[in-house]
Image (cartoon, rainbow, N blue to C red):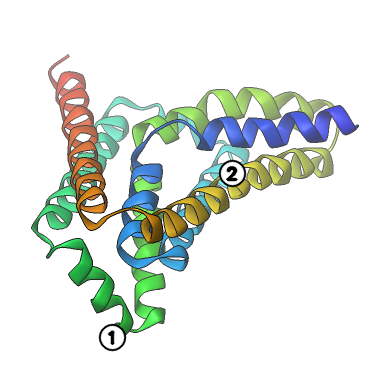
Amino acid sequence: MLGMIIGNIFLGLSIAAPVGPINIEIVKRGLSYGFWAALFVGIGGMSSDLLLMGAMFLGMSALLSVTWVKILLMMMGAVVLIHSGLVSLKAPNLMSDQSDERSAKPTYLRWNSFLKGFFIAGTNPMNLLFWISIYGSVLSGAFHEENVMTSFLLSVLVFVGIGLWNLNLAFTTHFGRLLASPFVLRMVHVVASFVLIGFGVKFGYQGFQELIG
C-alpha cells in the first residue's frame, strides 16, 4: 500500500517536472507577479487535468484520438502559446511589472493566472497525449479489475504529486526573484517567452503535418 502511494505521487511529480508550457508560464508569472500568480497557473493547469481525467473515465479518449480533433487541439495550443509569448515580450520591463502588481487587484491576477494555466494545459498536445495513453493505461486495470474507489485514490495521489511540484516551482520563482538582479530576471522572462512561442510553433507545425498527411 505504501509503495503504491509513493509510486503514484512520484508519477505525478514526473508528469509535472519536465520543462513544458505550464512550467514556463509558472516561472514567468512567478517572476512578474509573485507566489500566488504562479501557484494559480498551476491550479488552473490541474483543473484542466481534472476535466481530462474525468473525460478518460467517460471514454472520451476515442474522440481525442480522431485526426481532426487532434489537429484542432494542436492549432488551438499553438495560438494560445504564441499569443502568450508575444504578449509577454511586449510587456513593460519586469521591475515595472512588479510595481504594477501592488496596484493591480489580487483577485484579477489570480483569476487571470488560473485561466491562463487552464487553457494552456487544456490545449497542450503533450498533456493530452499523457492523459490518453500513459494515464489511461495506468488506471484502466484498476478501474476494471478492482473498484472505482481504488481508481479514485490512484488519481488523487497523481494529483498530489503534480500539486507538490507546482507548489515547489511557485515558491522557487517567488523567492528567486527577490535574490536575482533585474537584468537576470528580465533575461529569464524573455527566454521563457521565447520558449512559449517555440512550443506554439512546434504544435502548429505538428498540426499542419497532420492536416497535410
Q: Position of residue 189 (x, y in %)?
A: 24, 50
Q: Residue at x 83, y 26 (%)?
A: 145
Categorize mark 2 by other alpha carbons within 10 Å: few (<14), some (14-19), many (20+).
Answer: many
Q: Is residue 53 above or below residue 182?
A: above
Label 1 is placed on what type of residue? Ser
Nearer to me, 145 or 100: 100
**Residue receiving disc 1:** 103
Q: Quadrant of the C terminus?
A: top left
Q: Residue at x 23, y 37 (%)?
A: 195
Nearer to me, 155 or 107: 107
Q: Position of residue 56 (x, y in %)?
A: 57, 37
Label 2 is placed on what type of residue? Ile
Q: CA distance from mark 2 to mark 1?
A: 31 Å
Residue 52, labelled with which disc?
none
Q: Position of residue 21 (x, y in %)?
A: 34, 41
Q: Secondary structure at mark 1?
A: helix
Question: Is 209 positioned to the left or the right of 102 in the image?
Answer: left
Question: Is 155 positioned to the left or the right of 205 in the image?
Answer: right
Q: Secondary structure at mark 2?
A: helix
- Give the quadrant of residue 38: bottom left
Categorize mark 1 by other alpha carbons within 10 Å: few (<14), some (14-19), many (20+).
Answer: few
Q: Position of residue 14 (x, y in %)?
A: 57, 30
Q: Nearer the viewer, mark 2 or mark 1?
A: 1
Q: Is residue 1 above or below residue 180?
A: above
Q: Residue at x 29, y 82 (%)?
A: 104
**Residue receiving disc 2:** 162
Q: Quadrant of the N terminus?
A: top right
